[in-house]
Image: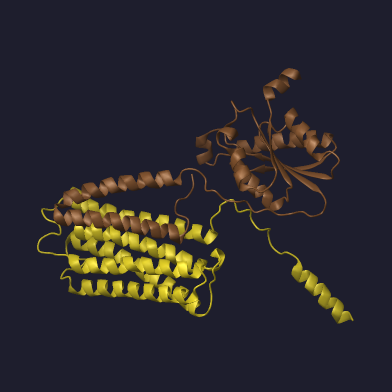
Chain colours: A brown, B yellow
Amino acid sequence: MHNPLRSEADAFKWVVVIGVGAVSVIVLTLLTRPVFGVVLAAVLIGFGIGFAYRGARGSLPGSVSLTHGGDGKHRLLVVANETVGGKALLDEIRDRCRNRDCEILVVTPALPTSRAAHWASDVDEAIELARQRMELSLIAIRELGLKAKGEVGDSEPNVAIEDALRVFAADEIVISTHPPERSRWLEHGVVDRAREQIDLPISHVVVDLAADRAVS
Amino acid sequence: MESATVALAHDAHDEEHHGPPEANQSSRIDRQTLGILLFIVSEVMLFGAFFASYFFLRVVVDPATWPPHPYELPVAVAGINTAILVSSSFTIHYALESIRRGNRKGLKLGLVLTWLLGATFLFIQINEYVHLGFSARDLAFGSIFYGLTGLHGAHVFVGLLLLSFATIRAFRGHFGPEAKNHLGVEVPGIYWHFVDVMWIIVYTTVYIL
């Protein structure tokens, strides 16, 4: 969801809509009886709340501002949570950084365990788990001989990417998810939205942790 | 030579960043705009408390007539006043649309018209109070009538102060077409629209229904 009232122009639209609704209530009341005006007002308020809810659904399209390094280094932003230590992701990172002076930032969004935990800002456990996964992945990446640092990001992956891009001049982004049938990120269109909003090459890596475990 | 070295060192010192780093701003909304929106949320709750009292008197206490005999409300005059205030939303919107297009003349005209319309509304409301024939001491009806309309009038007054600052700044050459350069009009504009919406609701419920 997003805030449907974000500027003076939005507020002005609300004034016009509420004004038109009020005029219809006033006219009906003056022509008939106040009770009919009350009923119409209640109906209009119901419709208004419904339309406001519909209009507030989904994220607003927007482009993410980028910073540029310009020092010859290839900067790779890796976004992953549970799949952050997956074999397919490590292979992808190794391929992307082959024969390059590569700098990697791993961002692990802190995903609350439930919607209730999210709304209650009960994210301490999620942050700690994300930090542990991120540190394990940094060890694995460094074992490949690559320089990497990590951050725990916002629970919303696209916001975490946007935040990271403010401080990390990425040349490329790798987003790692579970396979489509198990991935909430894919269900919520995280990769598609990132491609719409960010003018950088974005790779999507599918990590099947169950298959990884079976092999090991 | 020594003073030149000191000057260079001073320049280098000036270029250093002081204070904490710029915060990551995940929200795509200005802090000022977000601030006024949160303030408006608190204002809605304040008005909500007054409306709760009003509807308690109308629905639960349920007097035989509303307004109670022999009091009457000047529906027509207040209706004209409503039209005046609602039209001020159009003029503030015109002012903002003007500055978004770089039209400074339109900005000034829109702000002055908005201020005049707001002041006219307040003048007519005070005049209405003088001629109503009842006071806040006359029954609960008088208390809630003056409470609700007075609360709104106070908001119009605050809005006029904000518009005064914006108008003075506009005549001093402040504000520009970029969004970050006219927040000083955008924020009072949002507040002013809120004040207008609240009056539409107050007028419809108190004077009409």
Q: Determine the image quadrant of residue A190.
A: top right
Q: Is residue A216 above or below residue B26?
A: above
Residue B10 makes an appearance in the image: yes
Task: Find residue B135 and report its horizontal and vertical position in percent.
Answer: 19, 68
Q: Is residue A126 above or below residue A28?
A: above
Relative to the observer, which residue lies in front, B185 or A60? A60
Task: Find residue A154 and report its horizontal and vertical position in percent.
Answer: 61, 43
Left or right of A41: which side holds A186? right
Q: Which residue is pictured at 47% across the width and 77% down the height?
A: B105
Q: Is residue B44 above or below residue B111?
A: above
Q: Determine the image quadrant of residue A131.
A: top right
Residue at the top extreme of this rendering: A214
Q: Which residue is pictured at 26% across the width and 69% down the height?
A: B81
Q: Determine the image quadrant of residue A8.
A: bottom left
- For the N terminus of chain B, the quadrant is bottom right
Residue B209 makes an appearance in the image: no
Q: Which residue is pictured at 53% across the width and 78% down the height?
A: B173
Task: Find residue B31 and report its horizontal and vertical position in percent.
Answer: 54, 59
Relative to the observer, which residue lies in front, A68 or B41? A68
Task: Find residue A3 and report its horizontal and vertical position in percent.
Answer: 47, 50
- For the C terminus of chain B, the quadrant is bottom left
Residue at the right extreme of this rendering: B1
Left or right of B70: which side holds A164? right
Q: How many marks?
A: 0
Left or right of B99: which side holds A137? right
